[in-house]
Amino acid sequence: MTDEHPDLTVRLGPTLTPDPGRVIVKLFVPGEDAALVQTRASALIERIAQLDDDETSQLLDQTLARFGDRHHDLTATFQHHYELVHHRVARTSVLSPTARLLVGAYFSHEYAVEAAALCNPSMVPHPDQSNLDTEQLRVAVSLRQIGEGHLSSIGFATAVIGPGSRLTVADRSGPLVTGQRTGARHRRDLLAAGLAEDGWDNEVSANVLASLPERFGDEDFERALGRIPTDLLTRATTQSTLEQLRRTAAASYAMTFAADSPLHRRVLWPATPAESNGMEDARFVRFTGDDGEAAYQATYTAYDGRRIAARRLSTEDLAHFQITPMRGPGARNKGVALFPRTVGGRHLALCRSDGETIGLTALDGTNLWQPPVPLHAPGRGWELIQVGNCGSPIETDAGWLVLTHGVGPMRQYAIGALLLDLDHPERVIAELPGALLAPNDTERNGYVPNVVYSCGGLLHAGTLWLPYGASDARVEFAHVAVAALLDAMK
């Protein structure tokens, strides 16, 4: 069993449970979901084309009446899906605008983003702090949403903490939106770091990099590819290099949401091949730069069904997001967590590059996260399998408070704590001897049994507020008096 400190942690009442009614609309091509892919799209479109106008209108009206309230601008989605498959329309077929929308409806289906599980939250101050009492703080809670096929996306909830130990979670109802992918403003140094790490540092890639500005858009990138000298184009490796250049550049993208869409309705949905099977365990933090400007940063794990990759997300308002890969030895596993500010001029992060030890990594001048300095290895019974972080370090007067997770017998996950030196965070100056939070009898059953796990809490009014996933079944909340926690550390 795990030695928990029951006198430190106070569990709170609100619980977020998976809601199968939170759905998005995805493209559906009949036949592509079968074990033997045999697209039946053309035959379906021909059958729709044979319907008379009255039946076509009736079917479309019935569909919009049944599903329209569950989605934002469903007609526009049907039109978009029609445009994706209209090349399959026979040249002899002339489809009316109504028939085109009906085709789009048949090539659409609902996906419940959190039908399987809701877990692994992090918490940051909300961009909107209006209409609150002096002791209150509005917070944004990021959520790992898991649907059919164990496909993860990033969702949000809004809550208010205070006064005292009160925590109120806002309603999460209403149609979800997945945002609009827009052209990213790429960074040349990040592109160069990715090419170098993957072994594509050659004459062709060097020529392209040399012709790009420090910040560039997709059109700038294509122009740079078009300026490659003829004598380089004839080389045997040029085409494969060009393909790699495009893949590396496409890993960075931007996603935007309408400003009037409530935060709890926004869904960050996989948008690149590297994250096609999920965006997992986002660790959000409010980062303050050396110039005093603050913005949100997050790290998450991109998963394509076989490989994992670390990604970094930046946003000023939780409405417009820039996503870029993380490169280097310190970012080669799950669980990277950024510090909320630079330390001694260095951008730092916690990591677990060896899969079982908490480490400290720094970003070098070429945008590579360097080999980590080990901070904490498995040592106590409740964490002998592996240890990792539970979100970004939290700054206190005594040092950087790091919430950890450890894995023990029967693969039970529990949450612990370390304290790092403020100026030299490679030094561990204190540790909580036992677990801060372990699964109790009401938390041990779920999608993944015997797990409590967090991707980050925050400090408010001398209290650590901690959202956590209970056995990947639901999200619960707790708080801890920071002074008492520090006193209990050895």
Image (cartoon, rainbow, N blue to C red):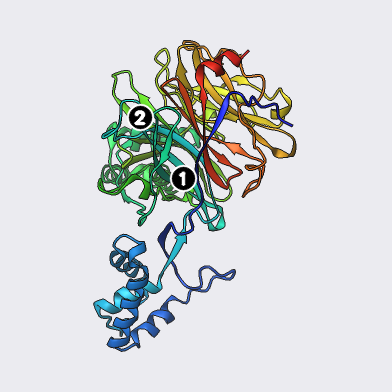
Q: Residue at x 38, y 79 (%)?
A: 45
Q: Mark 2 packing: few (<14 Cα in 10 Å), some, or many (20+)?
A: some
In x, y percent, where is residue 175? 35, 57
In x, y percent, where is residue 233? 37, 46
Q: CA distance from mark 2 to mark 1?
A: 60 Å
In x, y percent, where is residue 339? 45, 23
Amino acid tagged 1: Thr
Counting labels gives 2
Check disc 1 and report the residue beneath it.
237
Q: Residue at x 34, y 61 (%)?
A: 71
| Residue 136, numbered label | 2
Q: Residue at x 55, y 42 (%)?
A: 308
Amino acid tagged 2: Gln
Which element carries disc 1, helix, strand or loop?
loop
Say above or below: 466 vs 92.
above
Which element carries disc 2, helix, strand or loop?
loop
Q: Given contact means CB atoms under 8 Å apart, are the residues at marks 2 and 1 in contact?
A: no
Q: Earlier in the sequence, mark 2 or mark 1?
A: 2
> Which image quadrant for residue 244?
top left
Q: Is 321 positioned to the left or the right of 155 in the image? A: left
| Residue 68, numbered label | none
Q: Residue at x 63, y 46 (%)?
A: 448
